[in-house]
Amino acid sequence: MNHPGLGSSNRFFIPQRDHRWPYVLTALLAVSALVVLALGLVGWPRLKSTSIHYELIGLRAEVRELERRERELMLELEDERNPQRLAERARALGLVPSAPAGLPATAVSEVAQ
């Protein structure tokens, strides 16, 4: 039964698959790949430079700490090289001053008295 105005007016209408969708899908994937590639080309160097920057900050802090430690050790070394301190440590170890060149050395017991 064919009623006018109801249903399809084309009796020969054959449903067909749209042949454009593979092209649309390919174009969409290509554009997506380009966007990802562009983000990668822009983002990766930026990420690397940021990580290098943070590493540089850490290394500068380490250098400051090492310089501070070096100053402390230099002060400690100068304190240990102080002639008065050396003389005190020598006396504590039982050492006595040597005789000047050309004079006979005195016995340890004579110096201690």
Image (cartoon, rainbow, N blue to C red):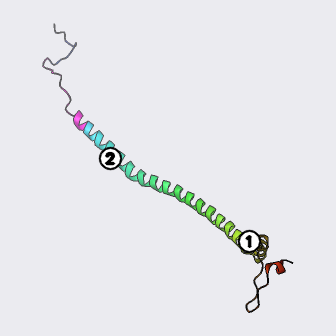
Residue located 39% across and 48% down the image:
39
- Give the class, few, some or many, for how many residues have Cα within 10 Å of label 2's Cα (few <14, many ≥20): few
Question: Which circle's residue, 1 or 2, is located before the other in the chain?
Answer: 2
The amino acid type of the residue labelled 1 equals Asp
Decide: is 52 above or below 67: above
Q: Tell me where residue 24 appears, x and y as whole percent.
A: 26, 37
Q: What span is colored magenta in the figure?
A: 11-24
Quarter occupied by residue 63: bottom right
Tell me if 76 is positioned left or right of 7 in this view: right
Decide: is 101 above or below 73: below
The amino acid type of the residue labelled 2 equals Leu
Tell me if 94 is positioned left or right of 62 in this view: right
Q: CA distance from mark 1 to mark 2?
A: 67 Å
* Nearer to us in this view, 105 or 54: 105
Q: Residue furthest top?
A: 1
Residue located 79% across and 79% down the image:
108
Q: Nearer the viewer, mark 1 or mark 2?
A: 1
Decide: is 5 above or below 54: above
* Nearer to us in this view, 31 or 39: 39
Residue position for label 2: 34
Quarter occupied by residue 27: top left
Total residue callouts: 2
Q: Quadrant of the C terminus?
A: bottom right
Q: Quadrant of the N terminus?
A: top left
- Kindly check if marks 1 and 2 are in contact, taking CB atoms under 8 A apart as contact: no
Decide: is 36 above or below 102: above
Mark identifier at residue 79 = 1
Mark identifier at residue 99 = none
Q: Residue furthest right?
A: 113
Tell me if 105 is positioned left or right of 7 in this view: right
